[in-house]
Structures are given as C-alpha cells and as structure tokens.
Amino acid sequence: MTPSTSPLPERSAPASDLASRYTKVRQASIGLAAGLEPEDCVIQTIPEVSPTKWHLAHTTWFFEQFCLIDRADSYRAFNEQYLYLFNSYYQTVGAMHARPRRGLLNRPLLSQVLDYRERIDAAMLALIGSRGDDAELAFLVTLGLNHEQQHQELMLTDIKHVFFTSPLGPAYTPSPAARRASPQPLSYVERPGGRFRIGHDGGGFCFDNETPRHDVLVDDHALGDRLVTNAEYRELVDAGGYREPKLWLADGWSRLQADDWSRPLYWSDDLGREFTLSGWQPIDPAAPVAHVSYYEADAFARFAGARLPSEAEWELAAAAAKVEGNMLDQKTFHPRAADDAAADGAAERAADDTREAAPVRQLFGDVWEWTASPYTPYPGFEPLAGSLGEYNGKFMANQMVVRGGSCVSSADHLRATYRSFFYPHDRWQFLGFRLARSR
C-alpha cells in the first residue's frame, strides 16, 4: 500500500522525533481515560458514540494494520480476532463488527486492550527506530497520530454523552468551566470578495481532503466577530422558534418533530442548566452555544436575518490567524466566552494582511463551526491510494463541513485548511456556529 503523493511531508523528521511524538500522543489517550472506571469504558448510548475501550483499541488497530502488518517484515497479528473487532469502516481491509453494536463487546477486557496497546507500541517503536527515515512510513505514522488525536476528541464527546445518559449525571472532571458576567455585543467584520486560493499548500502534514489548493470566487461579505452565544440562542427558544416551521429546512423540521427537539442537546428542561464534562452546571450566557445540529444553526441564522458562512469564507478569515484559543490543551473541556485580549492580539497579527480588516475571534477551539458548505471533493481531489483512500473520500456525500476545532481538539492537530464533517442532524459533538451576511 502506497499513499498518494499530495499529503507527504516535504522532508521527514528524524526517527527520534517521530518516536517521541508517537509516545506523547499514545500516552495522551491513556491519560484521557485514566480517570474512568472500567464500567465507564464499555457503554455505547447511541450509534454515533463508541465506548472508550473501543477507541483505545481501534487507534491501536490502525497502527497494527497499516504500519506493522503492511510494512514490518515477518510481523504476525497480535490477535486475528482483533482485526475484525476493531476495524472501523475499511471495507477493503476486511469485515468488521457493526458500529451500533460496539457497546455489546464485553470482551476483550479493558485490561486486555491496554495490554494490546503496550504490545503494539513496543513493535511500533522498534519499527520507527529501524526504518523511521522512510518517508512513506513516517507519513503513515504521522497520519496514525493525527487519527488518534481525532479519537481523543471522540473519547471526550462520547463519554460526555454516556455520563449525560446516566441518571446520576457523573462528572469527568471536577473543574467547572470559566464564566463571564454578561455576553459581549456581536459585531460583523466586513470582508472583501475576490478571487482567492484555499486548501493546503503542501507544506507539512494534511489530510487528503484538504487538497488540492485551488481558486475560489468569494463575494463581499461580513462575518460575525465571534461565535453565537447561549444567550443569543436562547432568544430563538424563547420566541418559539422550535415551533415555527418557516425557520426550518424541510429535513430539519422532520427531524425536530421525530426527535422532539426543543433546545440544544444538553440543556435542561428549565433552560437554566446544561450538562458538561464537569456534570450539570448553570448555563453561561456568554459562552458559545454548543451541541446544536446544522438544522438548528441554519434556523437560528434565518431567525437572526443572517446566514451561515461558506467554508471558503471561514478559511480566508482563518488564514492569517494563529491557531490559539480554548482547546484540549487548556483542559477546560467546555466552550468559553470570547476573550477580548485574544482579539487584540489577532488584530496586531493581521495588521499587514489586506484581507483582515478587523479581528474575527474564536476561529479555533470552543466549538466546531457549521458552515453552509456541503462536504464534497475539491476540484482535482485524489484520495490516498489503497485502503487509506477510504479515510475521507467515501464520506463526501450528505454531510456538511465544519471548521476550527473545539474545546476538546488538540492545538497541534488544527490548521486553517482542516476540514471536518458531520451529518446535518448530528448534535453530540461540540458543534456551534457563527453568523455571516452577504453584501
């Protein structure tokens, strides 16, 4: 199996650096699960949620399958049954256990999965030590580490849903999220249209769906200078927006009625509290609204006399911004209100960029931002060769692009060109939005 050339790094890092990063990322997953009990790690509450135990095993399967089995001389599978149990969706590799039934896997035990990780880690570090200067192997390891960081985020969003479903409402972390006294006013940043280029430029790692870099035409527009807050979204709820069909796309209205939506996923019936990774907490009115579907974001935009930005509009605004904000590294595990000091820094960094007329805040972290763009291939897109071509390309239908990462995304995993995607009805992720207007 050989990757396509577009995402390969221009120059491979030394094997020692690759081994160090491998160890750091792999240990971070164990750290995120360290405070959980074995009983916490086996539950699946909805088909979209996978048990923590499965995440720990699947990310290990990825390295075993695509690095050790495919590239290591004389390597024999740790356990042939694991190749079936922990494959996710790689049909070209072989059969797999059904996704909605991952919570029924009482075996292997969590302790056995942790042993599996240790054994594969030892084999991987030996492989990196002997062949880490191989550019294709270095790319596969780097891809696997970025894949694991995606699953670290999923571990947290999934355990949040598991704890929310429990009548006891347990907390993952005892630290409550920081709060502001009142929301800051929303303003719009005017941005000129024109012909621009978006997509990854080939320097360093990226996923294949970020390529190729290409031209886009963008009209004059304005972007909300920050994310939409809980207080603002509450206005839609209080105004009876969930009972007003003219605000909703047809599929959204059908989903609302079928699933009895009346508020964001983790809000309480009385609209005063929300479930967080610190358990039930008072809703912070100034924090970004989270856990809303694309349909809800679109309905609010219509309610507010605005729209959602396109992914090109978002990327052009983010291109001059530093990847900083409220992310996994801060360990708040919850969206926070826009930081005025961070906005001042963004203005200084963007002073010599003709595209940046004023600061656009909260571009990275807090919540993934729904865009109005369907998840489709860029012009000239070519997926990775072999089985890894299934990583992104085959999902390019019926989903919407989200941008910017969330409060449980790693900072070194994000960039302005990063494209993620979800179905328009998804809510269990940290999903929010900002507004845009045409001019």
Image: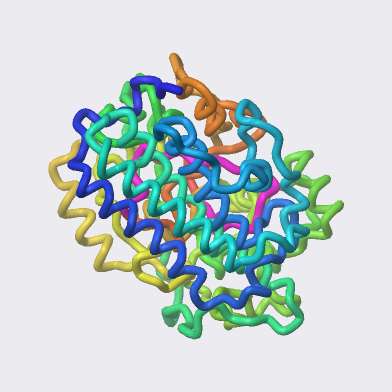
Q: Residue furthest front?
A: 74
- Visible residue check, residue 240: no
The image shows residue 345 at horizontal and vertical percentages of 20, 59
Q: Residue furthest right?
A: 258
In magenta segment, residue 414:
yes
The image shows residue 66 at horizontal and vertical percentages of 47, 35
The image shows residue 215 at horizontal and vertical percentages of 35, 19
Residue at the (46%, 38%) spot, across then down: 75
Looking at the rendered structure, the number of numbered marks drawn on it comes to 0
Q: Is residue 333 left or right of residue 357?
A: right
Residue at the (46%, 43%) spot, across then down: 63
- Residue 168's place in the image compared with 341, above or below, is below
Q: Looking at this view, is 358 or 128 the one in front?
A: 128
Magenta stretch prevailing secondary structure = loop
The image shows residue 216 at horizontal and vertical percentages of 39, 22
In magenta segment, residue 257:
no
- Residue 27's place in the image compared with 97, above or below, is below
Residue at the (70%, 76%) spot, across then down: 268
Q: Looking at this view, is 147 or 387 the one in front?
A: 387
Q: Is residue 351 left or right of residue 439?
A: left
- Residue 26's place in the image compared with 317, above or below, is below
Which image quadrant is residue 38 in?
Answer: bottom right
Numbered range of the magenta stretch:
412-433
Residue at the (32%, 28%) spot, across then down: 136
Q: Residue furthest left?
A: 352
